Image (cartoon, grey):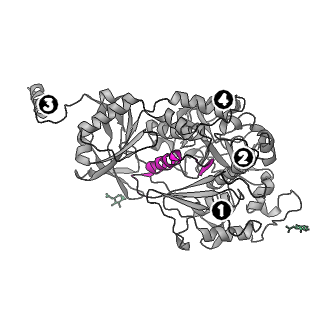
């Protein structure tokens, strides 16, 4: 009885010109409402959802092979990065995928409002009622109780069975991200106000660096040159999110105090995305944005630096991450280095989305961009310290196509900073470039922390740099900050300066760093062998001889890097 009623309903729908019901298949689910979120109630049917749809990309296997070839020093193709068109050709969905998805959208009267450069992402807007029908979903309002931020999500959605293999995912649907928070640190007063000598007569690290880190400390410690870069096409980009604004006046104060040798006009340029802004009222300056611009412009002397401010005109923070990478992939001449001091806990994303974003980093890497992310500030408990029983890896650090940066403290010798996140991805398998380094570590580790992490996952961080007692100018005053947010722009600046010297000799930029770092580059890092990163009621991992999931391969040595890259 019931069955025949259903059949009649379907026939009636067809007779009325409605699309034939397709056989649907559940595509992605979230088993339960994640902790820290609560179901408020059904989403209002006429609320418009701005959805985006990822098509399955055409040839990611081929792209990964190219990425490894152009990034591995021993390969004959090393440095032969792809052009935008070549990378787009790998990322572009197959014509049959485009046709199948477009036919489905058309029969549902859905108009695509935006298509990404490679055609792998489509955007469209439809009301909740239509989205619920289209995807057999129950869109509801959920509240992130810590922040009070509400969002419309569903615990499951379906797609037509015949679109499997063509349609990768629809977002936002089942991903519940905690809003990106600013840096975990607060600004503290400087411990001493003695300005370190800029004109050093020896290579010795100034004694004041034991209590506060300035550009002069980093130049002495890592051998970073103060001579300005000379190649204008060599660019460094700094990601900005969550209305963290980078202040030009704070940068000016910082440079006049710590880099009086640079021209007084030295600054960064600004790129706005998603309705982003970068207001210059001093009270709107953000710690993270000030830190990130001061430790790029102030370390990568003379390298043209762009602060990319991603605004709030996107559905959630994942969209902001997608939009910045999509923007960079749309440029013909993209920056050679990208530094980002934001991230997620890996479990907050689905593995489908994590893979999708990670593949976009693969494309940018294949084009010759070095992508650096901070590893997180919660030790083994994730991006910030939180309760946990098993270790929480962070994203994008767990993506094998980015370089993850941990943090150190102290000078002689450097030791791991206790907040320096590191560990093993539960989504991404261990890439071959790090197999030997990681197996040496795991053998030495024995059964410590067994069961709390995935020993066959992509291990991070890859490298580290200073991350405590770092002096910044913030809202007109100097203060000290800490975090992998410090070590990441510092490391990115060093790579940019190496790229400048390579470019000056007509050589290619370093591009995706990891295959180099774990091979001919390893000797250019000073091994950090003490300290640990506690979390989840454990002591975390310990730094030890060789690579470890607290400080990676160690901290950079500029002269050794020059030698390693053949300068
Ligand atoms: C979300 O949760 C917070 C904290 O419990 C509460 O104050 C707020 O009213 C909630 N918002 C909604 C829309 O339920
Ligand atoms: C650096 O210090 C030396 C020795 O005190 C001095 O001769 C030189 O002029 C100084 N250079 C600059 C650029 O101030």
Q: Are marks 1 and 4 in contact (CB under 8 Å)?
A: no
Which residue is denoted by mark 3 in the rendering?
Answer: 10
Quick one: 29 or 443, which is closer to the camera? Answer: 29
Quick one: 449 or 527, which is closer to the camera? Answer: 527
Crowdedness of circle 3 by 10 Å Cα count: few (<14), some, many (20+)? Answer: some
Measured Cα–Cα span from mark 3 to mark 2: 65 Å
| Image position, residue 187 (x, y; %) | 61, 66
Which residue is denoted by mark 2 in the rendering?
Answer: 503
Quick one: 178 or 477, which is closer to the camera? Answer: 477
- Secondary-structure class at tag 4: helix
Is 329 magenta? The answer is: yes
Which residue is denoted by mark 4 in the rendering?
Answer: 435
Q: Are marks 4 and 3 in contact (CB under 8 Å)?
A: no
Question: Which of the two labelled residues, at mark 1 and mark 4, occupies the earlier sequence position?
Answer: 1
Question: Which of the two labelled residues, at mark 2 and mark 4, occupies the earlier sequence position?
Answer: 4
Task: Establish whether ligand 2 lies closer than 8 Å to the Cβ of label 2.
Answer: no
Find the magenta span and give its range. Answer: 312-340
User: In front: mark 1 or mark 4?
Assistant: 1
Which residue is denoted by mark 1 in the rendering?
Answer: 294
Question: Which of the two labelled residues, at mark 3 and mark 2, occupies the earlier sequence position?
Answer: 3
Quick one: 527 or 216, which is closer to the camera? Answer: 216
Identify the image quadrant of residue 109: top left
Question: Which of the two labelled residues, at mark 1 and mark 2, occupies the earlier sequence position?
Answer: 1
């Amino acid at each position: 009885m019931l069955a025949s009623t259903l059949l009649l309903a379907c026939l009636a729908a067809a007779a009325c010109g409605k699309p034939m019901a397709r056989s649907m298949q559940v595509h992605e689910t979230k088993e339960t409402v994640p902790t820290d979120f609560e179901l408020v109630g059904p989403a209002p049917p006429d609320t418009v959802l701005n959805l985006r749809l990822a098509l399955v990309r055409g040839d990611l296997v081929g792209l990964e092979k190219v990425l490894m070839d152009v990034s591995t020093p021993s390969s004959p193709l090393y440095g032969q990065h792809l052009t935008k068109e070549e990378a787009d050709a790998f990322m572009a969905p197959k014509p049959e995928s485009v046709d199948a998805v477009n036919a489905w959208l058309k029969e549902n009267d859905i108009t695509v409002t935006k298509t990404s450069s490679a055609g792998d992402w489509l955007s469209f807007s439809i009301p909740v009622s239509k989205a619920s029908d289209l995807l057999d979903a129950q869109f509801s309002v959920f509240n992130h109780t810590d922040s009070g931020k509400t969002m419309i999500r569903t615990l499951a959605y379906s797609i037509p069975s015949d679109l499997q293999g063509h349609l990768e995912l629809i977002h936002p649907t089942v991903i519940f991200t905690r809003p990106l928070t600013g840096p975990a640190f607060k600004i503290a007063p400087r411990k001493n106000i003695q300005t370190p000598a800029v004109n050093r007569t020896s290579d010795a690290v100034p004694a004041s660096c034991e209590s506060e880190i300035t550009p002069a400390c980093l130049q002495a410690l890592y051998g970073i040159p103060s001579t300005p870069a000379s190649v204008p096409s060599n660019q460094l980009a700094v990601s900005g999110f969550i209305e963290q604004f980078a202040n030009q006046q704070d940068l000016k104060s910082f440079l006049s105090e710590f880099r009086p040798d640079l021209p007084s006009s030295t600054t960064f340029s600004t790129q706005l995305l998603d309705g982003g802004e970068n207001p210059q009222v001093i009270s709107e300056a953000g710690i993270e944005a000030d830190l990130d611009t001061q430790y790029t412009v102030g370390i990568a002397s003379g390298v043209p630096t762009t602060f990319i401010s991603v605004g709030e005109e996107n559905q959630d923070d994942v969209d902001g991450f997608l939009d910045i990478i999509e923007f960079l992939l749309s440029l013909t001449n993209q920056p050679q280095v990208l530094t980002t001091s934001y991230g997620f806990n890996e479990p907050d994303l689905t593995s489908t989305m994590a893979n999708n974003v990670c593949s976009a980093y693969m494309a940018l890497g294949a084009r010759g961009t070095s992508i650096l992310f901070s590893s997180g500030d919660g030790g083994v408990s994730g991006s910030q310290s939180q309760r946990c029983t098993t270790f929480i890896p962070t994203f994008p650090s767990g993506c094998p196509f980015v370089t993850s940066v941990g943090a150190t403290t102290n000078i002689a010798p450097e030791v791991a900073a206790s907040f320096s996140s590191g560990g093993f991805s539960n989504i991404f398998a261990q890439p071959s470039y790090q197999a030997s380094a990681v197996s040496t570590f795991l053998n030495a580790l024995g059964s410590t922390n067994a069961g709390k992490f995935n020993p066959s996952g992509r291990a991070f961080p890859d490298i580290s740099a200073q991350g405590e007692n770092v002096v910044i100018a913030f809202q007109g005053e100097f203060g000290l900050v800490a975090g992998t947010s410090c070590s990441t722009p510092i490391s990115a600046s060093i790579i940019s300066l190496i790229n400048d010297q390579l470019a000056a000799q007509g050589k290619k930029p370093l591009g995706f760093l990891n295959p180099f770092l774990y091979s001919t580059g390893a000797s250019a890092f000073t091994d950090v062998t003490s300290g640990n990163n506690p979390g989840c009621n454990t002591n975390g991992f310990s730094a030890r001889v060789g690579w470890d999931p607290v400080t990676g391969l160690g901290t950079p040595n500029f002269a050794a890097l020059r030698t390693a890259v053949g300068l």
